[in-house]
Image: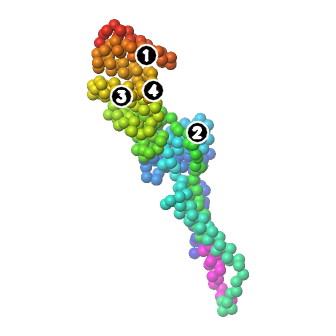
């Protein structure tokens, strides 16, 4: 039995050495195996075929190509996807036994092995027996327990990674819509989710997909957004209720609330001008608002040209175009 156990342990060790991923050969995959897929059940992003996992692996590969360190890459991913992507079990709660049990096993096994070397009196009646003494069997049992504890610690160690404070947020522009939706659904109470919601809603807004953008903007308003986040959401909600449902006064009211949070915001002023012009049929009121937009010093050249065209058309008393 002892030789069988020794052989089995040897096979396990050899297999672990030769089958373990080599970070030098495939650093991106080694990092991916340390991150849990946010939409999978206990599966790493390196092994998952899901779209979010592929997006995260692509991000890792890009960061590896940029020369980022392992810790920087992990911090970026953890900052984007919160603690739900960590594969290392926390040293608390239901996972506490994963950390305590291997240590206990090593301690007990070591104690049993050391006990073999204590001098003990052997009964006279057993001196002539060639069979293994209880001490040998105890030592063998201790070695087995010690090896089991070591294996358990190595298994847990496969999923360890350094935890950090002050995680650096990731730019949502590098993440697909599907991944952002999954992350938002899994981390609704995380403070970073407000920014992710707004970024995702803006994508839908720019694509004209008001049906998907609307609930995210509403969720941003109901959370605890910054004034800029609240203003951005209110501005676009105002335009959507006008452009989608033709509700002129509600649209102007929402945009006015946005301007209270972000006074003189060019985009809010421009959209209000469009609502006043096209909804109220008031080109003079729209012209005043377009003039305020052009007073902004940091307008993009193509935006400035477009607003100047609208201003000239409104000043001429023409209907909105």
State which quadrant residue 310 falls in: top left
Q: Is residue 45 above or below residue 90?
A: above
Q: CA distance from mark 2 to mark 4?
A: 39 Å
Q: Which residue is mark 1?
A: 292
User: N-terminal of the two: label 2 or label 4?
Assistant: 2
Give the crowd class for mark 1: few <14, some 14-19, many >=20 residues within 10 Å: some
Q: CA distance from mark 4 to mark 1?
A: 14 Å
- Element under label 1? helix
User: x, y percentage for residue 249?
Assistant: 30, 25
Quadrant where the image shows the N terminus: bottom right
Disc 3: CA contacts within 10 A as few (<14), some (14-19) or many (>=20): many
Check disc 4 and report its element: helix, strand or loop. loop
Give the percent coordinates (x, y) of residue 294.
45, 15
Disc nearest the viewer among 2 and 4? 4
Is residue 38 shown above or below 150? above
**Residues in magenta, as a range:** 127-143
Query: Does the stretch in magenta take in 133?
Result: yes
Proximity of marks 1 and 2: CB atoms separated by less than 8 Å:
no
Can you tell which mark lies on residue 262? 4
């Amino acid at each position: 039995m002892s030789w069988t156990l020794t052989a089995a342990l040897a096979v396990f060790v050899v297999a672990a050495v030769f089958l373990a991923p080599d970070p030098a050969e495939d650093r991106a995959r080694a990092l991916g195996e340390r991150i849990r897929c946010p939409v999978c059940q206990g599966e790493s992003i390196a092994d998952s075929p899901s779209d979010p996992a592929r997006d995260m692996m692509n991000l890792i590969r890009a960061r590896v190509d940029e020369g980022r360190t392992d810790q920087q890459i992990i911090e970026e991913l953890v900052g984007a996807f919160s603690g739900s992507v960590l594969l290392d079990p926390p040293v608390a709660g239901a996972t506490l036994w994963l950390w305590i049990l291997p240590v206990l096993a090593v301690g007990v096994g070591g104690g049993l092995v050391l006990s073999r070397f204590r001098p003990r009196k052997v009964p006279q009646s057993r001196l002539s027996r060639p069979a293994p003494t209880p001490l040998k069997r105890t030592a063998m049992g201790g070695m087995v327990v010690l090896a089991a504890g070591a294996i358990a610690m190595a298994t847990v160690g496969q999923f360890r990674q350094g935890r950090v404070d002050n995680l650096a947020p990731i730019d949502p522009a590098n993440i697909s819509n599907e991944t952002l939706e999954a992350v938002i659904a899994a981390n609704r109470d995380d403070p970073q989710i407000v920014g992710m919601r707004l970024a995702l809603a803006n994508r839908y807004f720019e694509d004209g997909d008001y049906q998907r953008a609307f609930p995210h903007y509403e969720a941003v308003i109901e959370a605890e957004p910054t004034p800029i986040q609240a203003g951005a959401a209110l501005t676009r909600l105002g335009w959507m209720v006008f452009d989608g449902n033709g509700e002129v006064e509600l649209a102007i009211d929402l945009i006015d609330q946005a301007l209270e949070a972000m006074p003189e915001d060019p985009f809010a002023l421009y959209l209000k001008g469009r609502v006043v012009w096209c909804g109220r049929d008031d080109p003079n009121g729209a012209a005043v608002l377009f003039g305020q937009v052009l007073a902004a010093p940091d307008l993009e050249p193509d935006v400035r040209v477009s607003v100047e065209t609208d201003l000239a058309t409104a000043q001429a008393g023409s209907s909105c175009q």
